[in-house]
Image (spheres, helix red, strand yellow):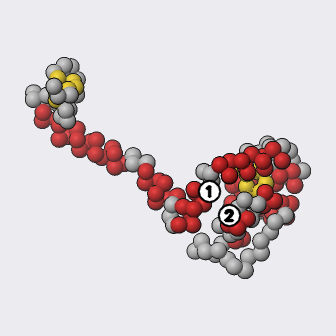
Amino acid sequence: MPRVRRCRQPGCHNMVAYPDHYCSTHHVHEAEYQHKRQAWHDANHTHHYNTVVRNRDSTKREQYNFYRTKQWVHLRQQVLDRDHYLCQYCLAQGVVEPGKVADHIVPYVVAPEHRTDIDNLTTACAKCHRLKTVWEQQHYFSEHDAIDPTAEQITDVKIISNLFYKK
């Protein structure tokens, strides 16, 4: 016996065999329904985000995959525990603010060899992390998102905090 479902026409209780959605009386609506379904699918295709935006190139793909490893989860937790969940950039400014982000002091893309170095990680609040990201773009990268080889790698949280808060 074939699989069946109800006709999609409101008020109609006729059964329809798969893969159709409308009974023989309302079959004229089938093409319109299929067109709307396809348009919705095209507009809401979430897979596009991860494959195109996040994984632009092999470096970004590698970075994206690193942040999903057990090693990163444990390292992040060690950093948050070490800093007592307090934003180190705010503390450098004399403000006590909770933080939940484990941030690379020298960015991952600039120094991938230090991605697992606990001394290159610190706790940040969302505001400081956002401000530091903007500062990193200006300090470490050229206008075409290429890493500037002449940029000095600053590892002191207090200096970095002063640099992105002075604006």
Question: Is residue 28 in sight in this rendering?
Answer: yes
Callout 1: 10 Å neighbours few (<14), some, many (20+)? some
Q: How many marks?
A: 2
Quarter occupied by residue 37: top left
Residue 147 sits above or below residue 117 on the image: below
Residue 115 sits above or below residue 91 on the image: below
Residue drawn at x 43%, y 48% as measured from the top left: 46
**x, y percentage for residue 151?**
73, 76
Q: Quadrant of the C terminus?
A: bottom right
With 42 as the anchor, is 108 left or right in this view?
right
Q: Depth check: give the residue in front, 9 or 85.
A: 85
As drawn, the residue found furthest toward the bottom would be: 150
Q: Depth check: give the residue in front, 90 or 70.
A: 70
Q: Which residue is mark 2?
A: 108
Q: Amino acid at mark 1?
A: Phe
SS type, badge 2: loop
Q: Which residue is mark 1?
A: 66
Callout 2: 10 Å neighbours few (<14), some, many (20+)? some
**x, y percentage for residue 83?**
83, 47
